[in-house]
Amino acid sequence: MNRLNRFQLLYLLALAPGLALFTGCVPMEPTVRRPTLYEARLGQAPQQDDMTLRAGEIRGEVVEIDPARREIHVRTDDARTRVLSYDPDTAKVFYHGSEYAVANLESGDLIAFQTRPWNSRYVATIRVQEPVQARAGSTIARRPPPPRAAVIEGTVERIDLDLGVFDLRPRDGRIVTVSLPYNARGSDVDSFRRLRRGDYVRLEGEFVNPDSFQLLAFLAESDRTGRIR
């Protein structure tokens, strides 16, 4: 080993203790543990955004979860029982912005779900609206009262056949998103599939919120020329 290499080696050996001391003084970022869904259930009350249905969503109460068959039994607001199929590797459950597995659901949870396509059994995303722990304090489930039937009419705008929704522009100029229920009548499904942008329709249904409308029936439909179909 020549003199230059010996000098470099001695320099590195002298520098090493200082580097170790400096490294040991660097503060480590604390590891933040995400709360489990069970902890979130106990520590967080439902928020208004949780209870608001979004376009195409259906509200229901979890009756049973069957992991062996990969099924969730749900009782919807219209007192019907639905069996939802799911993939445990890809299905997601959301509550207050955090993501959980379907296995974290419990019987009695009030959920909002949307099947894809809209009239199938398969569900990939579920939102917990009100956990069973928050509902257990009352003998009566605190779900919103059922909306009253209403009639709206207007011009068809955007249409999404996969989700079973379309946008309607009433005469006041606002946009209302109309969704078909999973158990829609065959005649209403046919009417939906015939829709084209610019058609004028008259509908009966229920307002989920001021901007979302769940269809009960097509009362009349006409094309852009005004001819009733």
Image (tube, helix red, strand yellow):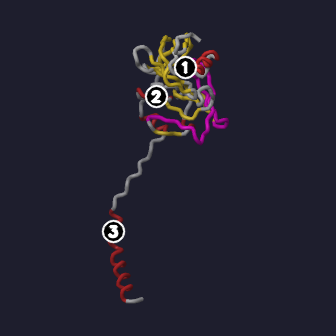
Q: Earlier in the sequence, mark 3 or mark 2?
A: 3
User: CA separation, marks 3 and 2?
Assistant: 51 Å
Rendering coords of residue 42 (x, y %): 45, 34
Rendering coords of residue 196 (x, y %): 55, 21
Q: Which residue is mark 3?
A: 21
Q: Amino acid at mark 1?
A: Asp
Figure check: 109 above or below 219: below
Residue 142: tell me if it is visible. no
Q: Which residue is mark 1?
A: 77
Q: Is residue 72 magenta?
A: yes
Rendering coords of residue 115 (x, y %): 58, 29
Rendering coords of residue 32 (x, y %): 41, 48
Circles 3 and 2, Cβ within 8 Å, touching? The answer is no
Asked where in the image residue 105 lies, by quadrant, the reply is: top right
Disc 2 versus disc 1: nearer the observer: 1
Residue farthest toward the front in the current orientation of the protein: 225
User: CA separation, marks 2 and 1?
Assistant: 18 Å
Disc 1 versus disc 3: nearer the observer: 1
Q: Secondary structure at mark 1?
A: loop
Magenta-drawn segment: 67-96
Nearer to me, 70 or 2: 2
- Location of the N terminus by quadrant is bottom left
Q: Secondary structure at mark 3?
A: helix
User: CA separation, marks 1 and 3?
Assistant: 64 Å
Task: Give the label on residue 25, or none.
Answer: none
Residue farthest toward the right in the current orientation of the protein: 69
Disc 3 versus disc 2: nearer the observer: 3
Q: Which residue is mark 2?
A: 134
Residue drawn at (55%, 10%) of the image: 227
Residue drawn at (45%, 25%) of the image: 52
Q: Earlier in the sequence, mark 1 or mark 3?
A: 3
Residue drawn at (38%, 85%) of the image: 5
